[in-house]
Amino acid sequence: MHNEKITRKNPEGMPAPVGHYTHITKIPRNAELYVTSGQIGTDRNGRIPDHMNEQIDNTFSNIKAVLDSEGLSADNIIKVNIWAVEPIDWDHLYAAWGRLFGQEYPAMTVGYLTALGLPELKIEIEIWAAKV
């Protein structure tokens, strides 16, 4: 018999995560996989704010809308990739993160780049999710 749910763990014998993520997120066989395009900080009218934290708030609203459109919740998220062009205010991002994820964190990668797809973008977040 195998486990029919998404599981997350931080293995013993290795350093604890340095942020709000889990080292390993495992999906069961035959789960349905969802991969989003990178979500950006546009508001509902397509405007992109100048400030990173406003873009973060809009990005998380957009992530929630994408998840809702497929009947998914934060529990279904297995991997998050975050790309930014300037330092992230982690206190602000983790507040938005906490409202979406609670204490169940998926695997995560963060990268700083010189540019994203549009010059005014400061952050982009890609979500991988699975439904059992």
Image (spheres, grey):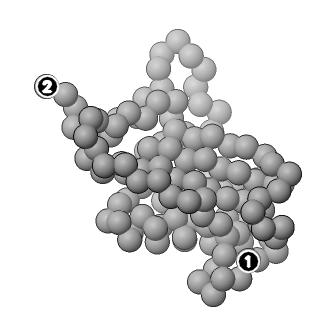
Residue 26, position as x, y percentages in the image = 38, 33
- The kind of residue on which mark 1 rests is Ile
Q: Which residue is mark 2?
A: 1
Residue 106, position as x, y percentages in the image = 48, 42
| Number of numbered discs visible in the structure rendering | 2
CA neighbours of label 1 inside 10 A, class few (<14), some (14 to 19), many (20+)? some
CA neighbours of label 2 inside 10 A, class few (<14), some (14 to 19), many (20+)? few
Q: Is residue 103 visible?
A: no
Q: Is residue 91 visible?
A: yes
Residue at the limit of the structure toward the top, as seen here = 13
Image point (54%, 71%), residue name: 61
Mark sitting earlier along the chain (2/1): 2
Tag 2 secondary structure? loop
Q: Is residue 97 above or below residue 108?
A: below
Q: Which residue is mark 1?
A: 48
- The kind of residue on which mark 2 rests is Met
Left or right: where 5 falls relative to 101: left
Report the front residue among 107 and 15. Answer: 107
Left or right: where 38 falls relative to 53: left
